[in-house]
Image (cartoon, rainbow, N blue to C red):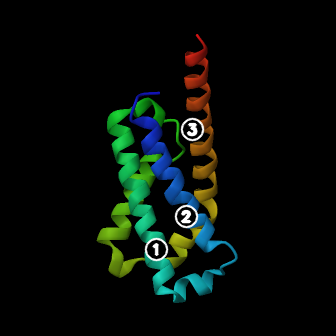
Amino acid sequence: MLPKTPKLLEDIRDAAAFIAEITRDVAAADYQHNRMLRQSVERNFEIIREAMRRLMQHDPATAQGITGHAQIIAFRNILIHGYDQLDHSVVWSVIQRDVPLLLTEIVSLLAKGDQRANNASLE
């Protein structure tokens, strides 16, 4: 794992965990009607996208191991440039379907990086 990779992965993990936490026990209709919640989620998707973009530039091999890495980057563009046509049910679907998988993969990558660092320090 390259030197900047753990920080970028941690940024993604933190933003994805925040989205999961603030939408836990929230119904889709409540999400659609709560502007503050939607904007908080959208901001954290922006952070995920930016960290993923940087990861693609810095460590493409690691980024390519993340399911949907290119779609993650494209999703932010939909949020930003298509804000006036944004379908909140699509965002809700991403929250429910994709964020848990992203979190699982990022946590796994971080754990592998920690394990490699620990093994290297033992040598």
The residue positioned farthest toward the top in the image shown? 123
User: What mark, if any, has residue 110 been given in the picture?
Assistant: 3
Residue 45, given in percent of the width and then of the height, sits at 44, 62
Q: Earlier in the sequence, mark 2 or mark 1?
A: 2
Helix, strand or loop at mark 1: helix
Count of labels in the image: 3
Determine the residue positioned at 52% across, 71% down: 90
Which residue is farthest bottom?
A: 33
Q: Quadrant of residue 83?
A: bottom left
Q: Amino acid at mark 3?
A: Leu
Rendered position, 118 above or below 31? above
Q: Which residue is mark 1?
A: 40
Amino acid at circle 2: Phe
- The crowding category of the residue bearing disc 2, from other C-alpha atoms within 10 Å (few below 14, some 14 to 19, many at least 20), is some
Question: Residue 36: image x %, image y %?
Answer: 46, 83
Query: Residue at (62%, 27%) from the top-left corner?
Result: 115
**What's the mark number on residue 18?**
2
21 vs 73: above or below: below
Disc marking residue 98: none
In space, the residues marked 2 and 3 are separated at their CA atoms by 17 Å
Q: Pick the residue in front: 3 or 24.
A: 3
Which mark is first along the chain, 3 or 2? 2
Q: Earlier in the sequence, mark 1 or mark 3?
A: 1
